[in-house]
Image (cartoon, rainbow, N blue to C red):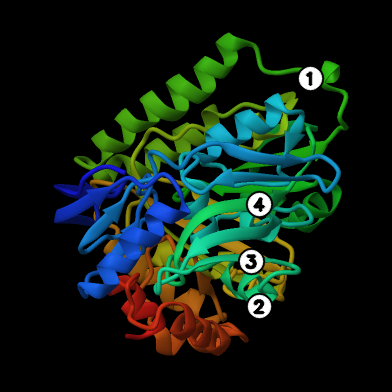
Amino acid sequence: MSTPQPSTWRNWSGLESATGLQVAAPADATEVADLVTRARAAGRTVKAAGTGHSFTGIAVPDDIHLRPDRMRGIVAVDREAMTVTALAGTQLKVFNAELARLGLSLHNMGDIAEQTLAGAISTGTHGTGGRAAGLAAQVVGFELVTGTGEVLRASATENPDVLALGRVGLGALGVLVTLTFAVEPLFLLRAEEQPMSWDDAMASFDDLTAAHDHVDMYWFPHSDRMLTKRNTRVGTDLSAAEPLPRWRAWLDDELLSNKVFGAQTAALNLAPRAIPAANRFASRLLGPRTYADIAHRVFTTERNVVFREMEYAVPREVGLDVLRECRTAFERSGLKVSFPVEIRVAPPDDVALSTSYQRDSFYLAFHTHHRADHTAYFGLLEPIMRAHEGRPHWGKLHTRGVEGLAPLYPRFADFLVLRDRLDPDRVFTNAYLDRVLGA
């Protein structure tokens, strides 16, 4: 284990940072437990922070920062049970690639794969559609070190209450060491991407989500255009893959979606009056494309343009009406926003602090460039989300506190009881957790 040394930490979006930290890189549960035990005795706090892709302060370390550098990789594969266990510091993109090498895949995933497994699970990272949208809903077991230094294992047969409550644990229950996922044979997805008018997209949304396994839409503010992305399972015969030609993938995904879009949105920060025309022009440039590839290459996208984001899950049955309400409020506001609004859906799950716990969900994600002021835009739309029982993504910007969050989750009180049991001295707390869970 490395010797603690003073350091600084900063998250990806640049909104959160910490200085004067002691940094350690434990390699296993024993080393983590030793660090936690010593920190507890000294009255200090510990936070395992990975790639910093959360926009909120959920991962901000105050005293001791545990880095994931030495807790990476797959440690067990059970082909009979169809499970794979990995160290919690493994990045999603590495995990996906290793699973593919083994001929295996997760059922579903979000569109960014830079996060560590622990970070993605702890914040409720999700995809769209499918039997299970959230990554945590695919977790069947984990090992963590609690605030008392205990190494605790949770599964359907061992500490099942901890499994039920702790899959989205917010980093408040302990330091995750390993995670065990239910997996399936590697499969292909056919992606169909097509621009549509606002009216056509809204009218066909329910039909599209019924006809395809995974549907994602992007509305360009100041325009009547949407980009629709429909992913459909086409089996496990990998010879049927029809990936994009390299030149097309480079042109669309690297040049236009990253370099050109990044330069354009940065420039528009200096000339906001040009944003409406630029959005309308950009939305007209989008053309249809269809391809088929292994799952993680279709689900995930490389995002190099730094942004800030607020995302809420509202009940599925009111989702389209909430989207219309947001558009009306935005257009009346006079604000100028250069990033699209992302629209996704998810089925109910049984993960206590998942934003889709026990209800069909409709996700609305709002973005701004990282150098643009996001406060007026997010502040305009957040009350609409609250009015419709919206649950904020734990890792994305919101202003909710424990008083407003507790009524949204039927098992919130049970989670707090478990937190008191596993971390009675609040070794893992920080300002964000004090706000959303109570001090």
Residue drawn at x 57%, y 80% is 388
Residue type at the position of mark 3? Ala
Give yes or no for contact between labels 1 and 3 (Cβ–Cβ under 8 Å): no
Location of residue 121 with respect to 12 vertically, above or below: below
Residue 428 spot, x, y in % from top left:
35, 70
Location of residue 44 with respect to 221 vertically, above or below: below
Residue 340 spot, x, y in % from top left:
47, 47
Residue drawn at x 79%, y 47% is 213
Q: Of tags 2 and 1, which is closer to the observer?
A: 2
Residue drawn at x 41%, y 68% is 149
Between the residue at mark 2 and the residue at mark 4, the CA separation in whole angstroms equals 16 Å
Residue 427 figure quarter: bottom left
Point out the tag, 1 or 3, that comes first from the N-terminus.
3
Q: Which secondary structure, mark 4?
A: strand
Residue 30 figure quarter: bottom left
Q: Circle 1 is placed at which residue position? A: 241
